[in-house]
Amino acid sequence: MTQHSAPLLKVDHLTKHFPVGGGRVVHAVDDVSFTITRGSTLGLVGESGCGKSSCARTVIRIYEPTSGNILLDGADISRLSQKELLPYRRRMQMIFQDPYASLNARMTVHDIVAEPLRAFRVCASRAEERDMVERMLNRVGLSREHAGRYAHEFSGGQRQRVGIARALILKPELVICDEPISALDVSIQAQVVNMLRTFQEEEGLTYLFIAHDLSMVRYVSDDVGVMYLGQLVELCRADEIYAHPAHPYTVGLLSSVPIPDPVAARLKDSVGLEGDLPSPIAPPSGCRFRTRCPYASQRCAEEAPALKEASPGHFVACHRLNA
Amino acid sequence: MEPILQVRDLRTSFLTSNGEVQAVRGVSFDVEKGKTLGIVGESGSGKSVTSLSILKLLGSTGRITSGSIRLGGEELTRKSRREMRAIRGGRIAMIFQDPMTSLNPLIPMGDQVGEMLWAHRKDMTKAQRREKVLELFRTVRIPEPEKRFKSYPHEFSGGMRQRVMIAMALACRPELLIADEPTTALDVSIQDQILKLMRALQKEMDMSIMFITHDLGVVAELCDRVAVMYGGLLMEEADIVDIFERPMHPYTMGLMASIPDMHQDKRKKLQPIPGSPPDMIHPPKGCPFAPRCPYAMRICAEELPPYVATGERRRSMCWLLDPEAPAQGNPFKQGKEAAV
């Protein structure tokens, strides 16, 4: 949580509930607040159903927020109409998880990458458009020859490059990466992660990087936020979360990641995490993690812990640490 | 000791409208009794087809073109469909990646596991089957087995469904368990639970497991021995500690360099393997990894390298290991170079 530079994105008490009938709601995102400094990356980590993707989609207004505020470069975009939102759309783009589902099978790679340019009428002529698309494709490691082809002719890694080209061609400031590498092979994952880092260094991009485990996030993030059942349970510098994880959920999540070292793996005194995620329709009272927490006490069932600064720059929502 | 499974020079192809896809191009390995063999590779490396070939689950377009698969000394490639049906689920059981698509959404879980016993253990009565299923549920640590017996797949979480799949696989006490990416669709914390369960069950039941995965971390946690596949070939095979201590193939080295290390300095960039995997309709004439290999020599593109023993119980397929290969810039001959 560096303070020296103004935040590009400020998310304030963001809540997103999905009605599921019978007056019940899915508590997808509950009172989540964070900021991302311009040019830095916040990694948002959690397991399926923790609300990380819903959070990202609400930030970019694919979903309408139930309450709370989203500030892009100081401007509150959380209540803007779709029309009012247009100038901001250009400044924030998204890279999706599944490079198979997120590219239109009936469009050529050129058309896919040119679509944002057309939507915002960026290019004066066809030639200019062709030129811009070609340059963008080159930057993601594809060539002019690829432009006329269709997405099905490409491997997963190449498709994700097309998705990145589409997201970056408008020169956005904020890029939301929703698990951009989880569908890819290991050797290709590293290619994509390095490419995203290079673009950030060159253009000062700001990333909100969503991931389901903590291992790859380390290579891209400046700050890391851990979500559990719709809430942020820990937020701090990336190095800090690996060196001194404080929330019992973070500790469990870290120890669940398999270690690629057979000797260490066999010696590992793994705690892991017991049980399954409770239903987000009826989350447990008090601390939502208490049903799986080895340290849960009576207080955890009665009172929800707030996200508080446990040590400088390190925010944790746990009674044990905020006592 | 005689290995449970012996695969020799297995070749499997699929006929498609674009031509013959040579998915597996001559693979040999053993699974030893009570041990876990990890088969590691990326999409399209042939690792899943290898396991499907063992069970002869190749559909109408796939066929084993040559090679031998011996289960406890018995040749499987010559078995009839009827004989294979008795082997599948009986002597060899398999767990797949996505437990939801492997389960019938309309049949209660207990009955689905019981079906396994009904098919293979005709001597059991309905009551005995029920008892056995409950026992299996307890074995795989499913809470409240009596209640869960009547539940449907959608009422289970992903981790619990995979436990049911394991229960089903264990029903007939198979000699060999093939697990094809059983934890890939699961969250890390649930993956950790399933891996712990498999490790415990292996000890309890002295099971032999063939574990297919793309994740070297999972391999390190679970396997005794590793075979690394690429382009339909087995590039390197070694004991678990040896391969992590000193990988002896440029592809294995590349894989290891591209996985994130939680204890590594994050400012260091990951080292990806450049390029993409080969086209298996027109597989390269030489080593399939040569176009992506930082050490590739001229011969690599022209001729398939032979296996070279790189230590006790380990071998690799790479021209760099050839006695005549140049020592300069050779990652496997640096020690010798210094000695000269």
Image: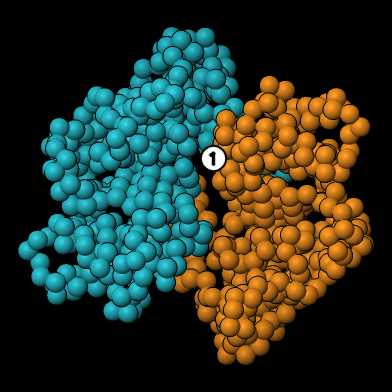
Chain colours: A orange, B cyan
Q: Looking at the image, is A260 positioned above or below residue B25? A: below
Figure check: B267 above or below B199: above
- Disc 1: which chain? A
Q: Residue furthest front?
A: A106
What is the x, y in percent for residue A93? 78, 49
Along the line of sight, the residue nearer the viewer: B92 or A126: A126
Residue A288 drawn at (x, y percent): 60, 78
Q: Nearer the viewer, residue B13 or A37?
A: B13
Residue occupying the point 16% across, 69% down: B129
Q: Which residue is mark 1?
A: A185
Mark 1 Cα within 10 Å, few/some/many (few <14, many 20+)?
some
**Residue A271: x %, y % from top left:** 49, 67
Q: Is residue B80 left or right of residue A232?
A: left
Tell me where residue A293 sits by quadrant.
Answer: bottom right
Quarter holding the N terminus of chain B is top left
The image quadrant that residue B59 belongs to is top left
Residue at (60, 52) in percent of width and height: A215
Instruction: Indicate left or right for B266 with B252 as reference.
Output: right
The amino acid type found where label 1 is placed reads Asp
Q: Foreground: A41 or B150?
A: B150
Task: Give the image quarter of residue B17.
Answer: top left
- Tell me the element at label 1: loop
Image position of B68 (left or right of B59): left
Viewer-closest of B152 and B330: B152
Q: What residue is at 26 percent from the left and 24 percent from the top? A: B65
Q: Residue B212's x, y, as percent?
A: 38, 44
Q: Is residue A279 visible?
A: yes
